Amino acid sequence: MGFVGQHAAHLLELLSSLRRIAVQQSISMPDAIIVDRNSFEIDLYAISDTKVVTTIAGGKIPYEADAK
């Protein structure tokens, strides 16, 4: 599997984890999330360090990380 394929596999695993959490907490999946780094420009093994900055769901922002 190439570099892009590995990133895609890890991102799909992350999405799967988010879906499991959403189902467990009876919440809907977000329409979009904004993260603190470009997952295609970082080391493959650093994806787990990625933090969600903003979540958009149903046209609303249910989560936004504290601004520094």
Image (tube, rainbow, N blue to C red):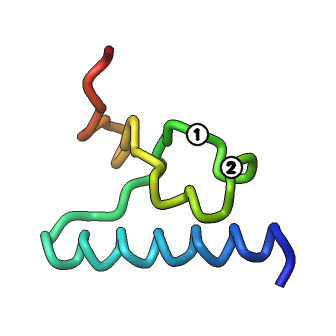
Task: Read off the residue under disc 1.
Answer: 37
**Quadrant (top left, top right, bottom left, bottom right) of the C terminus:** top left
The location of residue 63, given as percent across then percent down, is 26, 39
Foreground pick, 5 / 42: 42
How many other residues sit within 10 Å of disc 1, few (<14), some (14-19) or many (≥20)?
Answer: some
Foreground pick, 43 / 34: 43
The location of residue 7, given as percent across then percent down, is 69, 67
Q: In this rendering, which labeled residue sits more in front, label 2 or label 1?
A: 2
Label annotation for residue 42? 2
Residue found farthest to the bottom? 1
The location of residue 48, given as percent across then percent down, is 47, 60
The location of residue 21, given as percent across then percent down, is 24, 72
Tell me: residue 66, above or below residue 13. above
Q: Secondary structure at mark 2?
A: loop
Q: Residue at x 35, y 68 (%)?
A: 18
Mark 2–mark 1 contact, CB under 8 Å?
yes
Q: Residue at x 29, y 31 (%)?
A: 65
Foreground pick, 28 / 54: 54
Q: Residue at x 24, y 40 (%)?
A: 62
User: Quadrant of the rendered structure where residue 60 is?
Assistant: top left
Tell me: residue 53, above or below residue 68. below
User: As shown in the figure, which amino acid type bears the numbered disc 2?
Assistant: Ile
